[in-house]
Image (cartoon, rainbow, N blue to C red):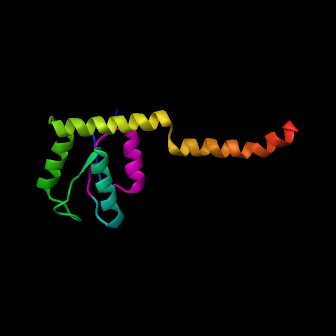
Amino acid sequence: MRPLGISSHLSKATLLTVISTGVPQVVLPVWVDLYDFATRAEWLGIGIWGNKKAAPSWSSEELSASILRTLGDGEEATRIRKNARDLADFIEKKGVGRSLAAQEIANLARLPYLAENEL
Protein backbone atom coordinates (compact mmCIF):
# COMPACT_ATOMS: atom_id res chain seq x y z
CA MET A 1 0.00 0.00 0.00
CA ARG A 2 1.36 3.42 -0.97
CA PRO A 3 1.07 6.32 1.49
CA LEU A 4 -0.98 9.39 0.56
CA GLY A 5 1.92 11.67 1.37
CA ILE A 6 4.88 12.18 3.64
CA SER A 7 5.90 14.80 6.14
CA SER A 8 9.54 14.92 7.17
CA HIS A 9 12.57 17.14 7.69
CA LEU A 10 13.53 15.99 4.16
CA SER A 11 17.14 15.03 4.00
CA LYS A 12 18.64 14.42 0.58
CA ALA A 13 18.08 10.66 0.91
CA THR A 14 14.47 11.16 1.98
CA LEU A 15 13.85 13.60 -0.87
CA LEU A 16 15.13 11.15 -3.47
CA THR A 17 13.32 8.18 -1.94
CA VAL A 18 10.00 9.98 -1.70
CA ILE A 19 10.30 11.38 -5.22
CA SER A 20 10.58 7.83 -6.54
CA THR A 21 7.34 6.83 -4.76
CA GLY A 22 5.26 9.54 -6.43
CA VAL A 23 3.64 10.84 -3.26
CA PRO A 24 3.45 14.54 -2.32
CA GLN A 25 5.58 15.94 0.49
CA VAL A 26 5.08 18.33 3.38
CA VAL A 27 8.60 19.42 4.26
CA LEU A 28 9.58 20.59 7.74
CA PRO A 29 13.24 21.63 7.44
CA VAL A 30 15.14 22.24 10.65
CA TRP A 31 18.64 23.22 9.55
CA VAL A 32 20.75 24.66 6.74
CA ASP A 33 20.66 22.38 3.68
CA LEU A 34 17.16 21.15 4.40
CA TYR A 35 15.73 24.59 3.62
CA ASP A 36 17.11 24.15 0.12
CA PHE A 37 15.33 20.80 -0.22
CA ALA A 38 12.06 22.36 0.93
CA THR A 39 12.47 25.04 -1.72
CA ARG A 40 13.22 22.38 -4.34
CA ALA A 41 10.11 20.37 -3.43
CA GLU A 42 7.98 23.49 -3.93
CA TRP A 43 9.84 24.47 -7.12
CA LEU A 44 9.30 20.99 -8.55
CA GLY A 45 5.65 21.25 -7.57
CA ILE A 46 5.75 17.99 -5.60
CA GLY A 47 5.34 19.35 -2.09
CA ILE A 48 4.84 22.20 0.34
CA TRP A 49 7.28 23.79 2.77
CA GLY A 50 5.16 23.13 5.82
CA ASN A 51 6.74 25.45 8.39
CA LYS A 52 7.93 28.57 6.56
CA LYS A 53 6.66 30.93 9.26
CA ALA A 54 7.67 28.87 12.29
CA ALA A 55 10.92 27.24 11.06
CA PRO A 56 12.94 25.61 12.47
CA SER A 57 9.98 24.79 14.70
CA TRP A 58 6.42 24.25 13.49
CA SER A 59 2.89 25.12 14.51
CA SER A 60 -0.17 22.91 14.29
CA GLU A 61 -2.02 25.60 12.32
CA GLU A 62 0.69 25.92 9.69
CA LEU A 63 1.27 22.17 9.46
CA SER A 64 -2.42 21.30 9.12
CA ALA A 65 -2.89 23.98 6.45
CA SER A 66 0.11 22.57 4.55
CA ILE A 67 -1.25 19.03 4.75
CA LEU A 68 -4.60 20.20 3.39
CA ARG A 69 -2.84 22.14 0.61
CA THR A 70 -1.08 18.92 -0.33
CA LEU A 71 -3.73 16.24 0.22
CA GLY A 72 -6.99 18.17 0.01
CA ASP A 73 -9.48 18.39 -2.85
CA GLY A 74 -8.35 21.76 -4.16
CA GLU A 75 -6.67 22.59 -7.44
CA GLU A 76 -3.27 23.05 -5.81
CA ALA A 77 -3.42 19.65 -4.06
CA THR A 78 -4.52 17.95 -7.27
CA ARG A 79 -1.64 19.57 -9.17
CA ILE A 80 0.93 18.60 -6.50
CA ARG A 81 -0.22 14.97 -6.48
CA LYS A 82 -0.11 14.84 -10.28
CA ASN A 83 3.37 16.39 -10.37
CA ALA A 84 4.63 13.89 -7.79
CA ARG A 85 3.24 10.94 -9.79
CA ASP A 86 4.56 12.32 -13.08
CA LEU A 87 8.06 12.79 -11.68
CA ALA A 88 8.07 9.26 -10.23
CA ASP A 89 6.91 7.86 -13.59
CA PHE A 90 9.68 9.78 -15.38
CA ILE A 91 12.29 8.40 -12.98
CA GLU A 92 10.94 4.87 -13.36
CA LYS A 93 11.17 5.09 -17.16
CA LYS A 94 14.73 6.42 -17.00
CA GLY A 95 15.77 3.93 -14.31
CA VAL A 96 16.83 4.38 -10.72
CA GLY A 97 20.17 6.13 -10.37
CA ARG A 98 21.85 3.45 -8.31
CA SER A 99 20.71 0.73 -10.74
CA LEU A 100 21.97 2.69 -13.72
CA ALA A 101 25.28 3.36 -11.96
CA ALA A 102 25.72 -0.33 -11.07
CA GLN A 103 25.00 -1.38 -14.65
CA GLU A 104 27.48 1.14 -16.02
CA ILE A 105 30.17 -0.05 -13.58
CA ALA A 106 29.51 -3.65 -14.64
CA ASN A 107 29.76 -2.65 -18.30
CA LEU A 108 33.03 -0.83 -17.70
CA ALA A 109 34.44 -3.72 -15.66
CA ARG A 110 33.91 -6.08 -18.62
CA LEU A 111 35.78 -3.87 -21.10
CA PRO A 112 39.29 -5.26 -20.44
CA TYR A 113 37.97 -8.82 -20.57
CA LEU A 114 36.14 -8.18 -23.84
CA ALA A 115 39.11 -6.39 -25.36
CA GLU A 116 41.48 -9.27 -24.50
CA ASN A 117 39.13 -11.96 -25.82
CA GLU A 118 38.20 -10.19 -29.02
CA LEU A 119 41.82 -9.98 -30.20
Horizontal relation, residue 45 to residue 91: left or right = left
Horizontal relation, residue 99 to residue 9: left or right = right
Q: Residue placed at 35% from the left, 35% from the top?
A: 86
Q: Residue placed at 32% from the left, 53% from the top?
A: 40
Horizontal relation, residue 1 to residue 116: left or right = left
Q: Position of residue 114 (x, y in %)?
A: 80, 39
Among the 4 quarters of the image, the one containing residue 53: bottom left
Q: Position of residue 73 (x, y in %)?
A: 15, 34
Is residue 27 covered in magenta? yes
Among the 4 quarters of the image, the one containing residue 9: bottom left
Against 26, residue 88 (above or below) is above
The answer to whether residue 18 is visible is: yes
Q: Position of residue 31 (x, y in %)?
A: 31, 66
Is residue 13 covered in magenta? yes
Q: Nearer the viewer, residue 66 or 39?
A: 39
Q: Residue placed at 16% from the left, 36% from the top?
A: 75
Q: Which residues are magenta?
A: 9-28
Q: Residue placed at 68% from the left, 43% from the top?
A: 106
Quarter of the figure that contains the C terminus: top right
Residue reaching furthest to the right: 119
Quarter of the figure that contains the N terminus: top left
Q: Position of residue 90 (x, y in %)?
A: 42, 36
The answer to whether residue 72 is visible is: no
Against 98, residue 10 (above or below) is below
